[in-house]
Amino acid sequence: MTKNEMTTYYAKRASEYERIYQKPERQEDLKRLQATIAGSFEGRNLLEVACGTGYWTQFACKSAQSIVATDYNEVVLDIAREKDYGSCPITFIRSDAYTLDNVIGPFSAALVGFWWSHVPKAKLSGFLEVLHSKLSNGATVVTLDNRYVEGSSTPISRIDDEGNTYQIRNLSDGSEHEVLKNFPARHEFVKRIEQLSEGSESIELDYFWLAQYTMKGNAEQQL
């Protein structure tokens, strides 16, 4: 899926995006993740990458001092802007997650919600380098994403030569889209960030995983 194809897919999916959070079997996991995100950014200036419709922004704002939330798709940002975030100052910016070229840091925290799985394996180091360049030393990075669960997750349709996995997704308008969706194991995540962080923690729930790490100084130069 090219960038333009992904943008089109998420624009079409915008109005139904949050239905995925209504699956009954996932509710207990989601409550735990919501509480964790709500308490993770006390007093910090947060950069959120690929914020989508603002679903996780509405929990991060419970503790963050301020938030700059980015997404490449203006359609989902329009939906995000309509949510109630209380007194937390929030700025929504259309920005490419691979460049963040119109985002001015540094930030003392970052949130990457359900984006890691959409990054091709060959682009992951580059994405992290850009993200870390926007963060201050000692910044907290929180990322969360899906685990693959047979019977609940959309089946894997194919695997490419680089090991990326794909799903075929159908929208309510009848359109069909092939979407890159990776499901990294814990050791893959740890391998990516162990040289960049002073320490990391992770949890694996039935349907999701969440990890948090603290940035080292000049981590972006160690990729």
Image (cartoon, rainbow, N blue to C red):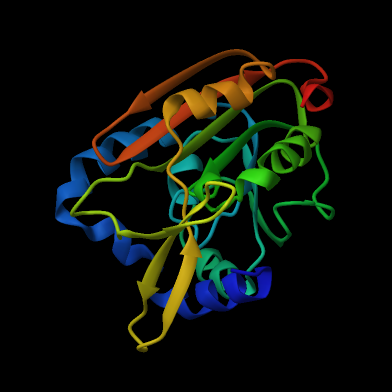
Residue 40 seen in the figure: no
Can you name the residue that lies furthest to the bottom here? 173
In this image, 89 relative to 29: left or right? right
Q: Position of residue 191 (x, y in %)?
A: 58, 22
Task: Note whether 147 is above or below 3 in the view shown.
Answer: above
Q: Is residue 100 shown to the viewer in this render?
A: yes
Q: Nearer the viewer, residue 67 or 16?
A: 16
Instruction: Locate residue 200 relative to residue 16 in the image: left or right.
Output: right
Q: Residue at x 52, y 75 (%)?
A: 9
The quarter of the displayed image where residue 216 is located: top right
Which residue is rendered at x = 42% and y = 43% of the image? 183
The answer to whether 18 appears left or right of 101 in the picture is left
**Is the residue 169 above or below the residue 141 in the image?**
below
**Residue 180: image location, x then y, percent:** 51, 59
- Which sits in the foreground, 191 or 103? 191
**Up-down relation of residue 191 to residue 209 (above or below):** above
